[in-house]
Image (cartoon, grey):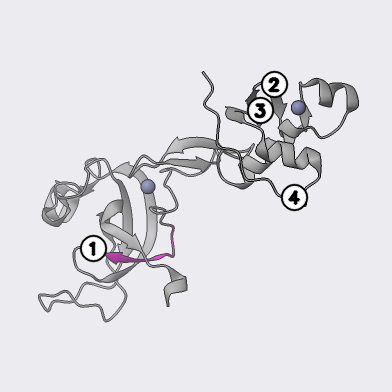
């Protein structure tokens, strides 16, 4: 049933309880609403990370911060399980697990695919840098480009991208030029399937 995660190497400087929290084989499974099931070789316990409670005897009778509470905190810090306020969902582009707030804006995107209003991104087709002005939960095969009487997914240069990609709207900065020598209308908003754009990492400048 439970899949045990590989223990983290012991740190000699940690107190014994912290060391056990890191090194003992435990499987942590998020249950939602800040609760986690922790399976150990000695039994399974329920941790409530919001209320800082655990059902183990150590916590119940001695009212101490037990190794299960500590292990849940460690796994949250390391990104192995979602924090109490978040849920695990699949990225709308690649499907990889990402932790989001349940009331957060859609589409849910992993760090690699996340684009937000105000981000600069590179258009993979033209190499141009665009400024993101909106991220829509609607799919490329649902959004129509009125001027071309087709959907974003059907548009010629978008056909290599997944039709269920969320649509991102962006503008070309003034002075941009396509490789055929024409210039984009800098006031016009263009729609892209999200995976056609790659976020420009501001740290790389
Ligand atoms: Zn416990
Ligand atoms: Zn992704």
Give the residue displayed 59% in from the left and 28% down from the top.
27
Quadrant where the C terminus is found in the figure? bottom left
As displayed, is residue 157 above or below residue 88? below
Confirm if mark 2 falls within 8 A of ligand 1.
yes
Give the residue displayed 27% in from the left and 81% down from the top.
175
Mark 2 against mark 4, which lies toward the viewer?
4
4, 88: nearer the viewer: 4
Image side of residue 165 versus residue 31, left or right: left
Report the Cα–Cα distance between label 1 and label 3.
Answer: 42 Å
Report the Cα–Cα distance between label 3 and label 2.
Answer: 10 Å
Q: Which mark is residue 45?
A: 2
* Image label count: 4
Give the residue pinned by disc 4.
12
Residue 121 on the magenta span: yes
Mark 1 against mark 4, which lies toward the viewer?
4
**Is residue 199 visible to us here?**
yes
**Between discs 1 and 3, the one toward the N terminus:** 3
Q: Position of residue 50 (x, y in %)?
A: 73, 34
Report the Cα–Cα distance between label 1 and label 4.
Answer: 49 Å
**Between discs 2 and 1, the one toward the N terminus:** 2
Find the magenta span and give its range.
116-123
Give the residue pinned by disc 3.
35
Q: Quadrant of residue 148?
A: bottom left
Give the residue pinned by disc 1.
124
**Between discs 2 and 4, the one toward the N terminus:** 4
SS class, disc 2: strand
């Amino acid at each position: 049933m439970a899949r045990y995660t590989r223990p983290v190497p012991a740190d000699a400087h940690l107190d014994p309880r912290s060391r056990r929290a890191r090194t003992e084989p435990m499987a942590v499974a998020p249950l939602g609403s800040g609760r986690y099931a922790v399976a150990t070789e000695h039994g399974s316990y329920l941790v409530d990370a919001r209320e800082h409670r655990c059902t183990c005897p150590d916590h119940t009778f001695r009212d101490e911060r037990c190794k299960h509470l500590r292990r849940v905190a460690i796994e949250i810090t390391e990104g192995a399980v979602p924090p109490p306020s978040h849920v695990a969902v699949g990225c709308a582009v690649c499907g990889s697990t990402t932790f989001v707030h349940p009331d957060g804006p859609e589409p849910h995107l992993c760090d690699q695919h996340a684009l937000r209003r105000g981000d600069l991104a590179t258009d993979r087709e033209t190499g141009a840098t665009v400024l993101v002005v909106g991220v829509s939960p609607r799919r490329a095969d649902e959004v129509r480009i009125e001027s071309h009487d087709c959907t974003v997914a059907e548009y010629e240069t978008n056909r290599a991208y997944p039709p269920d990609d969320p649509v991102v709207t962006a503008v070309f900065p003034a002075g941009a030029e396509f490789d055929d020598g024409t210039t984009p209308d800098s006031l016009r908003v263009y729609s892209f399937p999200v995976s056609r754009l790659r976020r420009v990492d501001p740290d790389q400048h």
